[in-house]
Image (spheres, rainbow, N blue to C red):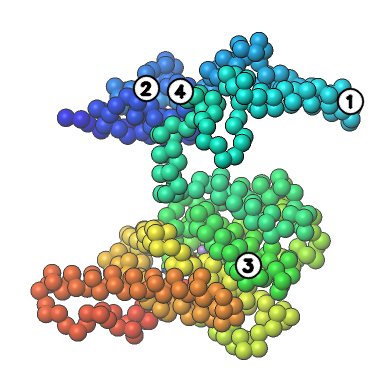
Amino acid sequence: MATTKIIYFVVDGRPEQAEFPSDCPAQDVKEVFRAAAEAGPYDILKLYNTKGNMINISPKLESNIRQTQYKLEVVAADCKTNSLGSELAAALGFDLSAMEKRLQALEKKILVDSADMPSVMYEMRNRVESFRDKLESVEHLSWLGLFKELTEGTNKPSPFYHKRSLRKTKEECQQVMENYLHMRQWEDAEIMVLLQLMYIDLDFMSKFNIEIEVLQQFLFEVYRHYNNIPFHNFKHCFCVTQMMYGLIWLTDLQNKMDDIDILTMLTSAICHDLDHPGYNNAYQINARTELALRYNDISPLENHHCSVAFKILEKSDNNIFRNLTTEQFKRIREGMIKCVLATDMARHNEILNQFRSIMPVFDFNNKKHKDVLTMIIIKVSDISNEARPMDVAEPWLDCLLQEFFNQSDMEKLEGLPVSPFMDRDKVTKPSSQTGFIRFVLLPLFIELANLFPNLEQHIIDPVRKALDYYTEMENALEMEKLNRTGSSQSDKIGKPVENQEESKRVQIQLSQTKP
Ligand code: 5GP
Ligand code: MN
């Protein structure tokens, strides 16, 4: 019978592990390692054991443990080593790409040595280029394999295509389609690029003279200071920031508020959960942690997130605000503190009521009004998972519950009060969402959509759908419970949790951490 093998190895400094049945075809085993190394079809893979001996990548590979992991190396395919490159070089009597490389190096040297490029260099470059054009467009030279059929509308197969190595393999295409349809998780480095793009796209780089290296360093420090915990991690930081970025565009905020306030909002979103330990304020206060002591039980986590943000910004290499005036920095600092502290859910009703009271006379020229709006927008972004497509939102709920359950387990262990909405014996996915959506998400989102009606389709419609989905799930669970206990189906079905009870539960979630 085939057994499953787990092979531990490291590639590019990254620990990886491969799993395959012992009767797996050799080619498939190789493909697994090729994928892990992100190697192309022509790259050569070399696997070494702990003694430094090269070993064969095959289904017969000996299983190992992390301590005796193998080392995988990729030898990149060079254009000269692929068959077309060498065939062409042999046919021409010289290697065109090598010649272009030499020319480039020469150009670079000349540009460095004497700011101007001499005309002879221009002429040389033109000659190489026109030679390449000729090879690519003259049909009777097609045997060289560089000819490109440029005429549109012709079905005549170009001699170019007889080189199979240039065509994508079926497996290669299937892999891309698989990735495309079932989008893999973005990697952290890619997420950092996306965050960087938001600053570029909102024109902050030029408006606030932010150097790209400083932004990159800042984003790296932010990444470093998010912990590996189920929910409040770097990906949550990205989701909140991306929602903020989306809302900025959807509400046309750049035409309604100052750029510096928008920069403050985006940066606040990025920083809003820095160094979250995975245990909420109630735990901090009840367990009398270092943070609760430092901040006297007043929003200990949010105070900490914000403090970490400004510690990162203290270092000039990370300080994206270093080219601003003292006045501008002061304004951003005040704004960021306001925004990050507003994410404490214990202040939810206070902030929402403040917004409700100014809504009838909301004025974009009134600083106080704008301050409340920025707090509302970061709050909306912070709890916006349910506004995302279901297949994105539901795994986030699993992560949140995992973090909640970790906390309640710890509270039980330490003999601390257990938050009921975190207790794995009391909470289910639907019971955690129906009340939260009804009494927290919808009232907040509806209030923001009153000011920006076009938001309805983006944040309210999907949340209503999520409510239907979880209500149905709750009914199904209730039905199952009734069937199991054998009780008669009462009229409870359809409204398994009374509104009052639900509302009470949510209020506990919102108010338990109030100092
Ligand atoms: P954060 O801790 O992320 O700054 O603030 C948001 C808080 O709101 C979370 O810690 C969590 O308690 C609550 N929250 C956010 N999204 C959801 C959700 O989808 N369901 C529930 N039940 N609570 C949520
Ligand atoms: Mn958050």
Q: Is mark 1 within 8 Å of ligand 2?
A: no
Measured in 3D between alpha carbons, the distance from the residue under mark 2 to the one under mark 1, in whole angstroms, is 53 Å
Q: Is residue 340 left or right of residue 57?
A: right
Q: Is residue 238 left or right of residue 283?
A: right
Measured in 3D between alpha carbons, the distance from the residue under mark 3 to the one under mark 4, in whole angstroms, is 46 Å
Q: Residue at x 29, y 22 (%)?
A: 60
Q: In this figure, which residue is indicated by the disc labeled 1?
A: 118
Q: Is residue 275 left or right of residue 71?
A: right
> Tag 3's secondary structure?
helix
Q: In this figure, which residue is indicated by the disc labeled 3?
A: 248
Closer to viewer: mark 4 or mark 1? 1
Measured in 3D between alpha carbons, the distance from the residue under mark 3 to the one under mark 1, in whole angstroms, is 49 Å
Quarter occupied by residue 430: bottom left
Give percent across and percent down for residue 168. 47, 32
Q: In this figure, which residue is indicated by the disc labeled 2?
A: 57
> Considering only vertical position in the picture, is 251 above or below 318?
below
Q: Earlier in the sequence, mark 3 or mark 4?
A: 4
Amino acid residing under circle 4: Leu
How many numbered callouts? 4
Closer to viewer: mark 2 or mark 1? 1
Q: Residue at x 87, y 28 (%)?
A: 117
Q: Earlier in the sequence, mark 2 or mark 1?
A: 2
Q: Is mark 4 within 8 Å of ligand 2?
A: no
